[in-house]
Image (tube, grey):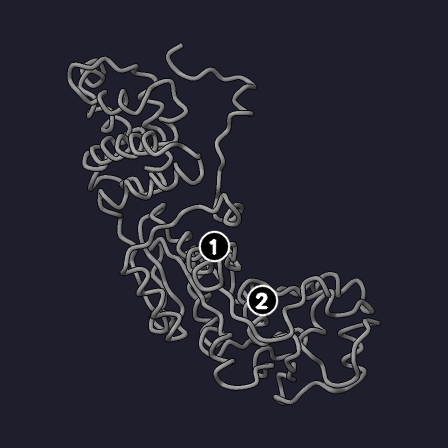
Amino acid sequence: MLGLDLNGHLLKNRLDGASFGGRATGVKKRPYLPDDSLTTAAALAVLLGQPLLLSGLPGVGKTGAAYHIASSLFGDGQEPIRVTVTTQTTGRDLLYKFDLLTRFHDKDIPLRRLLRFEALGRAIATACGSSALVLDAATDQPVTEPSRIAAIVGDAVREPGPLLLRDLFQPVECPPDKPQSSVVLIDEIDKAPRDTPNDLLESFEAMRFTIDELGLKIGAKDAANDDAERRRSRPVVVATTNAENNLPDAFLRRCVFHEIAMPGEAQLKKIVFEHLRTIDKLDEGKANDLASAAFAVGDQVAKRIKGSSRAPGTAEYIALARAVHVSPITAAEFRTAMDSGSKPQPELIKALLGVLVKTADDLGKALEIFPSLSATR
């Protein structure tokens, strides 16, 4: 057998995916090793109260940075409130959704059942605290009219008085009573229509927004006791971009921008090593051998395809090391396959390189670093 057999036994030997979205907590927390420039940029964004806009190659660690920031600020196991932007995402979609269709069919349903706070909206609500006043959007005054409150909350048990933020939530979704900070991750914001970031300018700066369907203003009043508490509870916004589309100047002006560069050799090996040790529980020797082999091959491949295609990112170096780990060859054999005198298994090497490069042209160039293979192609 020159490669891997495809059968049911593979299922019980799967490696842990350890994605940031699903496995960021507990002992399987994915390691993240930021450099000083990223740490400083994140700290400045927190101190200035501005969104942190992260750019860089796909797979270089932009999304992971938001999870690292959340755990650094609030403790291990804490995660950001995440939303992934699409080409259809509007500014309102990041704040809330209101089910107009159900409202059309059922005029008697309590309005709060039709309302759902989305990532940025939930972060703003958490920063206000559930005992914050909800204002009328037209008058900027608390909502006190009993019939209007009854239409919103239905028969929910509540204390008499003005409409509070907690009255808009189902009990299991209600934010804490006191204002708290959180990290909200807006992933791939550059995919959104150009107006989307501009629609959020007030929400980013003032941390408030209007629910148009209900005529309510959220965030204009909060439950903070003093200005210091208000500053502490302000959400930390992290947005990522792959630079597929230009972002509006008005949005960029309000951001702390940072480009995550591809790590150098020592840092990249350390990142791969820590991943293999933490997620795959490999011993130090094996993890070090795999990290070194992945870099040796990956670096040569990156040089071959430079200028014509996207270079492999950090995530692909990790994937390559893990692929070699579960393959029939050792790290040493994979690394020495680049020697002119070696006779590697062509189909296995080709399959392993498919973890690193993603197009037929790039694969052809990658195979050129293996002399015995390129000579037979």
Percent coordinates x, y for residue 214 in the rendering: 68, 76
Residue sitting at x 55%, y 25% = 12
Please say if 297 is above or below 222. Answer: above
Q: Is residue 95 visible from the viewing direction of this image?
A: yes
Q: Is residue 358 visible?
A: no
Could you tell me which quadrant the N terminus lies in? top left
Q: Nearer the viewer, residue 128 or 254?
A: 128
Camera-side mark, 2 or 1: 2
Q: Is residue 117 above or below residue 205?
A: above
Helix, strand or loop under label 2: helix
Query: Can you say which quadrant of the picture contains the C terminus?
Result: top left
User: Percent position (x, y) of residue 356?
Assistant: 32, 33
Residue 122: horizontal and vertical position, in percent?
A: 58, 67
Callout 1 secondary element: loop
Q: Which mark is residue 42?
A: none
Q: Amino acid at mark 2?
A: Arg
Residue position marked by numbered label 1 in the rendering: 87
Q: Is residue 318 left or right of residue 28?
A: left
In which quarter of the view is residue 252 placed? Answer: bottom left
The residue that appears at 62% across and 74% down in the rendered structure is 211
In percent of the image, x 56 and y 19: which residue is there? 8
Question: Is label 2 in contact with label 1 (beta carbons under 8 Å)?
Answer: no
Q: Quadrant of residue 284?
A: top left
Q: Residue furthest top?
A: 1
In this picture, is 185 found above or below 340?
below
Label 1 CA crowd tier, 10 Å (few <14, some 14–19, many 20+): few
Query: CA–CA distance between discs 2 and 1?
Result: 22 Å
Question: Which mark identifies residue 122?
Answer: 2
Kind of residue sitting beneath label 1: Thr
Q: Is residue 242 left or right of residue 28?
A: left
